Amino acid sequence: MKKLKIQFTEKLLTKNAGLYLLSLFADKLSLKSLLEKEVHIERGITAQYNISDILMLLILSVLAGAKHISQVAILRHDDVVRAYLELNKFPADTTIRRLFGLFTFKNCVELDRVEKTLRDKVWSYKWFGRVTFDMDSTVKGVYGSQEGAEKGYNARKKGQKSYHPLLCFIAENRECFHNWFRPGSSYTSNGAIEFTKECLAKKPKHIWKIFVRADSVFFSGDFLEYLESQNCEYLIKVKLKGLKRLLFSQKWRKVRNQYGTETAKFVHKCQNWKKTRTFLAVRNIVEEPDETMLVPKIFWGPNGPGACLFVI
């Protein structure tokens, strides 16, 4: 990578100036060298571009705002970026598509090794002994017939094809630690335990404690048993279906300096569970507008959106 001197002049202007700092960071981590060493794809003898160069271009294009391969042109016409990346020639869109068409699962594993090497290198400077895993799933709708997109649950546009990935973030540094790319037809909790196993296998060795926070889709006895077997602490949101009656009989306590908020703590054993677990409930005053009344109706959860239940 070529070093540049940053100046505020009228020559060699760019709207992607921030990419230079990110490129310096990638160069310090030897990202391109790692890609050359780890990622191997059989190509023809007429291939003009290194795999590492195309991968670096794609990474920087995404950081610059590219949503699909045709938008790699964001960098193709940026003379400053091409100067410090030392790109005399720029690959065509068809070349990039052809390369990724050769990708196999083996190459995904190779990229995963690159990611782990980089993470270990960065975390060697500053690391956390205790980290928080925030696990969730999300639905991303797409238009047209895109590869891997299928119809499934989509709250925004029913019947639209979508992707339904599983995600794990580290709360302490907001790092996307792990992800599974899934079609939209996948049920939210499918593979939750296997996904968590991969997350724990990827964690750096010096992490001694994991705290898992997850949405209600992860609420199952098998998932909780696995976390306990790995000595993980957890806070899982609970599906209220079938458990609302439990909340009426609990002793609620007011939260200091928070008007209209109360909490309750109790133990309960759900059906098919092998043991009891601790639950924490939170409820708030809910105001329900009523056109026939001057003052809105005010009531406590759990009959409305004013109640949340967690297993801890």
Image (cartoon, helix red, strand yellow):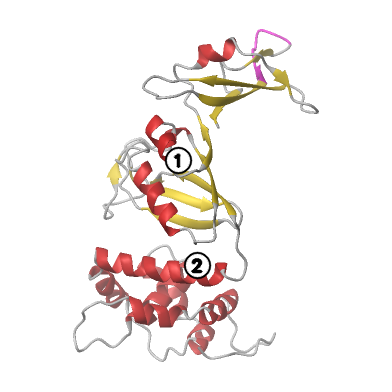
As for residue 291 lying within the magenta part, the answer is: yes
Query: Is residue 71 at all visible to an observer of this figure?
Result: yes
- Kindly identify the amino acid type of the residue bearing the numbered disc 2: Arg
Q: Secondary structure at mark 2?
A: helix
Q: CA–CA distance between discs 1 and 2?
A: 23 Å
Comparing 151 with 258, the one in front is: 258
Q: Quadrant of the C terminus?
A: top right
Name the residue beneath numbered marker 2. Answer: 119
Q: Say whether residue 280 is left or right of residue 75.
A: right
Farthest residue, direction left: 44
In percent of width and height, residue 249 lies at 59, 9
Comparing 42 with 124, the one in front is: 124
As for residue 128 lying within the magenta part, the answer is: no
The part of the chain drawn in magenta is 285-294
**Quadrant housing residue 280:** top right
Q: Identify which residue is drawn at 43% across, 59% down.
A: 202
